Image (cartoon, grey):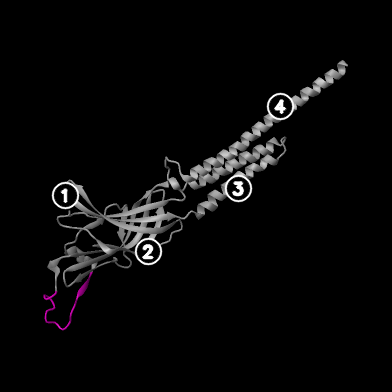
Amino acid sequence: MFSYTLKNNQGVSGISEITGDFEVDFMYSEIWVDERLKFRDRLFNNSTVCFTNITLKHDFRAKIWTPDTSIINSKDSKVHSSPTENAYIILYEDGRLWSNFRLKVKAPCKMDLKMFPFDSIQCQLVIESYSFNIDEVRLQWDEIPVTLMEKVELPDFDLTGSSTMLQRLQYPNGIWDRAQVNFTFARRYGFYLFQSYFPTSLTVISSWVGFFFDVRSVSARITLGVSSLLALTFQFGNVLRHLPRVSYIKCLDVWMIFSVIFIFCTLVELALVCQLNRWEREKQLGNKVITQWLGHVK
């Protein structure tokens, strides 16, 4: 039987889009029964003192049988040791053992950035018995598998929910139980509204100021259009450097592409206006020359 306890002073310490993983500190608890360790009616029979459980240090674990469970999808994990190893075992009189660890684990997340920055992320912890198949070890979640002591908040994400599931997987040497917990994180998009959407909107609007310039102010209009395009490119690059290089189009990409198109259209409009103005001036100059020539003829 397994359960997790997440605390705010531990909890999820960070999510990385670049490496596609998250770091989480939690209390990892597991319960199993070993009838050989029963001490009811054995150790304290007819005693005036009644013990229902015994708390043992972590080194006792090496002396007994354990289900040998592990988080198989972890990239890195460790047991906290401040000041000593944060682990203990409680032995109950009926042979139940309750093992507790305070762990720090780095595990992968499934990231689909198509809706970035309005997306959500799924992060998983997958548990299996490393040594024993279902003939010897069966996994089962506790009635309350995940306990949040306080709300988990991150600068970029909010933990919106968690779910658990049990699976059975066929390996060459047997069938194994797999217990999995999924954490769902919703991205906080306020940062991207103020750092990407609003600035790019102002950049596009500022490029339209050139429409009110005099037609003959070609240099000023070109400078304004090119400067807006460079500013937009810089803003886009500043966001992309914090994201993985994916091959599909994101929601933010669509916004940036249309922003670039709007600014590019202002440059195209400038070229058309300049060309039409030149044709008009040439036409006026031609009419003036013809008028003067006719005047001399008369």
> Does dot 3 land on a helix, a strand or a loop?
helix
Compute the Cα span from label 2 to label 1: 37 Å
**Which residue type carries mark 2?**
Gln
Q: Nearer the viewer, residue 183 or 50?
A: 183
Q: Name the residue under label 3.
A: 202
Residue 47 is covered by the magenta coloring:
yes
Given residues 228 and 266, the one toward you in this image is: 266
- Mark 4 nearby-residue class (10 Å; few <14, some 14–19, many ≥20): few
Q: Specify the segment rendered in magenta.
A: 40-56
**Residue visible at 51% across and 51% down in the picture:** 192
Q: Which label is found at residue 279? A: 4
Q: Which label's residue is closer to the chain start, 1 or 4?
A: 1
Label pair 1/4, CB-CB below 8 angstroms = no
Label 4 element class: helix
Spatial CA span between label 4 and label 2: 72 Å
Residue 39 location (% of width, % of height): 14, 73
Given residues 288 and 87, the one toward you in this image is: 288
**Left or right of residue 207, residue 168 in this image:** left
Q: Which mark is residue 10?
A: 2
Tag 1: residue type?
Gly
Q: Identify the main secondary structure in magenta.
A: loop
Disc 2, SS: loop
The answer to whether residue 28 is seen in the rendering is no
Check disc 3: other Cα within 10 Å, few if <14, some if 14-19, many if 20+: few
| Percent coordinates x, y for residue 294 in the rendering | 84, 18
In this rendering, the label closer to the viewer, 2 or 1: 1
Q: Mark 1 points at which residue?
A: 174
